[in-house]
Image (cartoon, rainbow, N blue to C red):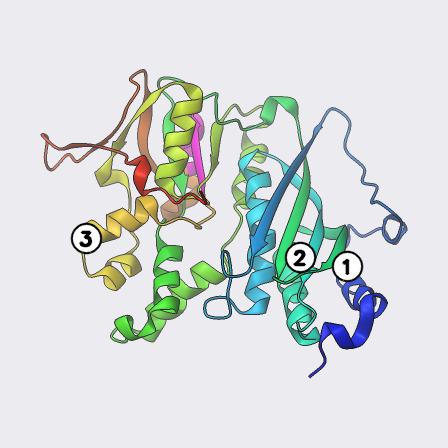
Amino acid sequence: MVILKDIGEHELLTIISQYCDYGIACDRNKNGDDAAILDIDSGKQLVVTTDVLVENVHFSDRTTPPQSIGYRAVTANLSDIAAMGAIPLGITVGLSLREDVTVNWLKAVYQGMEQSLKPYHINIVGGDITRSKINTIAITALGQVKPENIIYRHTAKQGDLILITGYHGLSKAGLELLLYPHKYSHISSKIKDKVMFAHQYPKPRLDVIKRLYREFPEMMIAGMDSSDGLADAIIQICEQSRVGAKINLSQVKVAPELVQVTNNHKKAIDWTFYGGEDFELVLCTSAKIAEYLYKSGGEDCQIIGEITTAKNIEIIDPENNHLKLLLNRSKIFQHF
């Protein structure tokens, strides 16, 4: 088995370059120099985001095959671009790799990146490589957006409806099954495959942003993605906008697979709010835009509440009029 130590840096760069030029948006004249040059449309602003994935923190052999590592690394950045209301232009990839990494492992990582990028006709336009004692992947994504279309976290206002895309908690369920397969041996293969796929191959919601542009070219929306969990997104939007929220628990759809995995409705709701790594969108906007997304997205979109002037975030259960729970910041994942 060939490892990086055996081939040297120049051969390594030759291998990587195969994944940097493909698709209809490719311009080979923009790769191979000291930096990439990208065109940006007139009247738009550049959006830049970076995510760092570290071995045994964000991925491991136990939970993430190499192709999924590359896919998830790209998705995390494309999700941030979508969360700003932007359309991606390209990415750069920084790698810090152990010298005993196999060439096949590296190729699979790049194949995963290619799998995530290809539907959006985006290229890898540059990057850097260095030797390290631990594998680390740092991706920077570049996008463009009209100033009036930027989605900020601090612009939510009273009366906005809170809309979320997709189901939350499936990635958490997938991770649990990957970490503790013996605990879930009774779960059907169909459910196992779905939740593990949700964890290993999440989808950035660029499709929602493109749909919004087609219908509302001058859209005004507050929001962010839910990479750190649904509860985290709601709390951050409210804190930065200096508003509160009421969340109607009956409007928060819990994925049927989540109920099957947890076999506990309370835990299923807990994972829905605090699971993380679903890479969905949490948007606060007018009733007109929210209703459009809800009706055009079917089960894929849920209107779960509204923004208020209060400074707290209530979770209201209509079946129990006396139950008013506050979102719990202490349950949100933080690196430090």
In which image quadrant can residue 210 be found? Answer: top right
* Residue at the image position 39 percent from the left and 39 percent from the top: 164
* Residue at the image position 37 percent from the left and 56 percent from the top: 172
Disc 1 versus disc 2: distance between alpha carbons? 8 Å
Dot 3 amino acid type: His
In which image quadrant can residue 68 be found? Answer: bottom right
Q: Which mark is residue 265?
A: 3
291 inside magenta stretch: yes
Dot 1 amino acid type: Tyr
Q: Earlier in the sequence, mark 1 or mark 2?
A: 1
Q: Along the horizontal axis of the image, is 58 left or right of 274?
A: right
Disc 3 versus disc 1: distance between alpha carbons? 46 Å
Q: Along the horizontal axis of the image, is 169 left or right of 40?
A: left
Q: Which mark is residue 22?
A: 1
In the current view of this chain or complex, which residue is farthest to the front? 133
Is residue 122 visible to the viewer in this orientation of the structure?
no
Magenta span of residues: 281-293
Mark 1 vs 2: CB contact within 8 A = yes
Number of numbered discs visible in the structure rendering: 3
Residue linked to disc 2: 118
Percent x, y of residue 101: 66, 72
SS at mark 3 in the image: helix
- Compared with 124, 115 (above or below) is below
